[in-house]
């Protein structure tokens, strides 16, 4: 029997290295399968930062996109919805040069279909009975938030003709044809609305190259409509908020009656993803009888199979492998199988095949890493729910990972330091799926808390809307509430709490350090916002109305906006920061430009505080280059050793 070494928290030796986390990982997304042939594909990141297309074969996987191409787009700046499989198994995609190409996966021949450097394309959806493909088109002829125009276009893959068929709305998401190619559906909304509350679902009839009979299906009463998807029988499914949660609805062919897809016992589950990232796929109709779905409850995913005839459902996933499924991750493979990208409590993100006939079977297709976290070193997440002490009284949620290492234990009576991580968005959320970065720290003796502050999605409408008008207030208070709860209950060490985040999570980090300086011993901020007004002045079209909703409470006049933005900008309260702060930022960041970090560092230095700024020359918003991600992780650990131990 081995004896565990006694060493202070933070000093434990771990086999999980920065090199293994960074150099041997890949991003997996966008599984797709041809409904005619059954051939299946997915998108995978390359080491050079590009994205390729892979085919799932009987004996493994194979790359089908030549090296000189990268399947990506910049529609709405975030991109997404990368490609579609055509009826003849060729693939239509947008390349890094914004042009649209057709890929033959057998010969690997790539043919340019259409292209203009000022036009961007995404969200391709093929008509199974004709050469037409629907897509989002974004026109940057006037390259300003006010001048950019968005359309839904129909592209003829035989003639290369591209026709704008919808052009009256400010924003469009997720166009798609029904199975027989006679109808299409899409989401749209206008300034100053946000998609979370105001996306509307429409359908229209398709006549070969034009549309008619446009009908509003859902969304007229702030119903938060999301993720429309056609079933094999021509039913139209979609998520819609009723009460507090987004439920799944079905519109039968030829009917105007919307029927909720009942899932008894999952009353607080959210169905259908609606985020800033276009092209969410979190459920898929498999047949006329069955639908596979990944509802989220308090940030945690369940994979279920719904019997549409009987109304019954069953779990077909497990928390060890599939406790977190987000964004573009689910695709129908056959009447009895699906492809799902997800992470589990002890398993890093992977692509799986799930067969649901009889006893469900989960088969791994592709791992996101070649160097998996050893199971014996995995710290498992604990769902934390606390009641706030401050006003307004509220329930808060997050996931806690405690220190775990089979070879080490801390001296008796010692408590671990805590790293609190704040998600971006700010209306995103963090799930419980295994994140190697988290295990890097827990295996060294740190506790890690991913807290889903008020404003996070996947916790119901009221939880999300609590951030409107309160950004920088309630979310930073939530950080302090969680830190106080975990220290006063003796779960982590008082005086040993650090906070970190990226983008809007970086803003939360800075804001928490200015409003609650006595709570945190250190901070690490990547690509964070320090000046809200400058962010608002330079933001892109998709988020151009976001700041108004975040800082202006109902009834507050817009003339107050500049004052409120200044009051809630950490830059102008830098003198209140007492904890050492590490800032990391990319030179190419267009979302939060580098000067936001530079001016924050200067302000802290002038106030006599301790700050360090690390600048990456070849990075944009957030770090993605392997060398920079490794640098970020190593510098963060040094910072925590200095401030928390």
Image (cartoon, grey):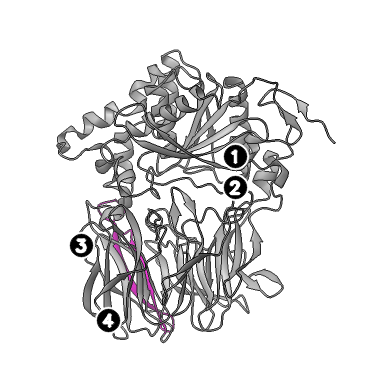
Is 156 contained in the magenta span? yes
Q: Give the Cα separation between the discs numbered 4 and 1.
A: 49 Å
Where does label 1 land, which residue? 438
Q: Which residues are magenta?
A: 131-159
- Furthest toward the right, the residue is 1
Name the foreground residue: 524 vs 69: 524
Q: Give the Cα separation between the discs numbered 3 and 4.
A: 20 Å
Is 638 contained in the magenta span? no
First in sequence: mark 3 or mark 2?
A: 3
Where does label 4 land, which residue? 205
Q: Mark 2 and mark 3 in contact (Cβ < 8 Å)?
A: no
Left or right: 132, with 546 as reference point:
right
Q: Position of residue 522 (x, y in %)?
A: 51, 23
Left or right: 567, with 272 as reference point:
left
Position of the N terminus by quadrant: top right
The label number, if any, that marks residue 220 in the structure image: 3
Q: Position of residue 392 (x, y in %)?
A: 29, 31
Q: Mark 2 and mark 1 in contact (Cβ < 8 Å)?
A: yes
| Whether residue 586 can be seen here | no
* SS at mark 2 in the image: loop
Where on the picture, by quarter, is residue 200? bottom left
């Amino acid at each position: 029997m081995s004896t565990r070494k006694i060493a202070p928290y933070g000093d434990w030796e771990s086999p999980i290295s920065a090199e293994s986390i960074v150099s041997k990982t890949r991003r997996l997304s966008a599984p797709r399968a041809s409904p005619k042939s059954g051939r299946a594909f997915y998108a995978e990141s390359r080491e050079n930062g590009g994205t390729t297309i892979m085919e799932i074969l009987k004996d493994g996987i194979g790359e089908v996109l030549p090296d000189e191409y990268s399947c990506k787009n910049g529609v709405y700046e975030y991109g997404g919805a990368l490609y579609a499989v055509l009826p003849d198994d060729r693939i239509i995609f947008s390349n890094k040069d914004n042009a649209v190409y057709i890929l033959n996966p057998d010969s690997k021949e790539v043919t340019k279909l259409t292209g203009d450097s000022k036009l961007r394309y995404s969200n391709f959806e093929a008509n199974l009975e004709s050469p037409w493909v629907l897509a989002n088109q974004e026109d940057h002829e006037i390259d300003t938030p006010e001048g950019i125009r968005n359309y839904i276009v129909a592209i003829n893959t035989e003639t290369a003709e591209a026709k704008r068929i919808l052009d009256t709305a400010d924003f469009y998401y997720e166009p798609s044809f029904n199975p027989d190619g006679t109808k299409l559906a899409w989401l749209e909304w206008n300034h100053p609305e946000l998609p979370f509350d105001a996306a509307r679902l429409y359908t229209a009839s398709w006549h070969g190259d034009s549309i008619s009979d446009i009908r509003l299906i859902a969304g007229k009463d702030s119903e938060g409509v999301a993720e429309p998807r056609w079933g094999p029988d021509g039913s139209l499914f979609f998520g819609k908020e009723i009460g507090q949660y987004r439920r799944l609805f079905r519109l039968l062919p030829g009917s105007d009656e919307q029927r909720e897809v009942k899932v008894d016992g999952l009353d607080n589950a959210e169905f259908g993803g609606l985020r800033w990232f276009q092209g969410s796929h979190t459920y898929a109709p498999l047949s006329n009888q069955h639908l596979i779905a990944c509802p989220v409850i308090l940030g945690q995913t369940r994979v279920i199979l719904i019997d549409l005839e009987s109304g019954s459902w069953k779990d077909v996933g497990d928390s060890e492998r599939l406790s977190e499924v987000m964004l573009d991750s689910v695709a129908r493979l056959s009447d009895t199988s699906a492809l799902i990208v997800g992470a589990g409590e002890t398993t890093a993100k992977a692509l799986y095949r799930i067969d649901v006939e009889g006893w469900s079977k989960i088969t791994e297709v592709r791992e996101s890493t070649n160097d998996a976290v050893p199971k014996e070193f995995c710290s498992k997440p604990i769902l934390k729910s606390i009641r706030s002490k401050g006003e307004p009284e509220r329930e808060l949620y997050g996931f806690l990972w405690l220190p775990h290492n089979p070879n080490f234990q801390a001296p008796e009576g010692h408590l671990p330091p805590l790293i609190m991580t704040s998600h971006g968005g700010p209306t995103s959320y963090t799930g419980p799926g295994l994140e190697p970065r988290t295990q890097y720290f827990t295996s060294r003796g740190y506790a890690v808390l991913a807290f889903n502050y008020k404003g996070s999605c996947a916790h119901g409408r009221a939880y999300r809307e609590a951030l409107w008008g309160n950004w920088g207030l309630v979310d930073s208070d939530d950080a302090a509430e969680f830190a106080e709860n975990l220290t006063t209950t003796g779960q982590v060490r008082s005086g040993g709490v650090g906070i970190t985040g990226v983008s809007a999570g970086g803003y939360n980090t800075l804001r928490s350090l200015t409003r609650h300086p006595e709570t945190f011993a250190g901070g690490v901020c990547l690509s964070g916002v320090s000046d809200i007004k400058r962010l608002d002045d330079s933001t892109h079209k998709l988020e151009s109305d976001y700041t108004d909703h975040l800082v202006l409470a109902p009834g507050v006049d817009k003339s107050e906006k500049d004052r409120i933005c200044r009051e809630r900008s950490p830059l102008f309260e830098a003198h209140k920061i007492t904890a050492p702060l590490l800032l990391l930022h990319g030179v190419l960041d267009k979302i939060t430009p580098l000067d936001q970090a530079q001016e924050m560092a200067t302000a802290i230095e002038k106030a006599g505080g301790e700050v360090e700024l690390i600048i990456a020359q070849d990075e944009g918003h957030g770090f993605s280059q392997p060398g920079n991600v490794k640098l970020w992780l190593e510098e963060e650990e040094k910072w925590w050793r200095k401030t928390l131990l």
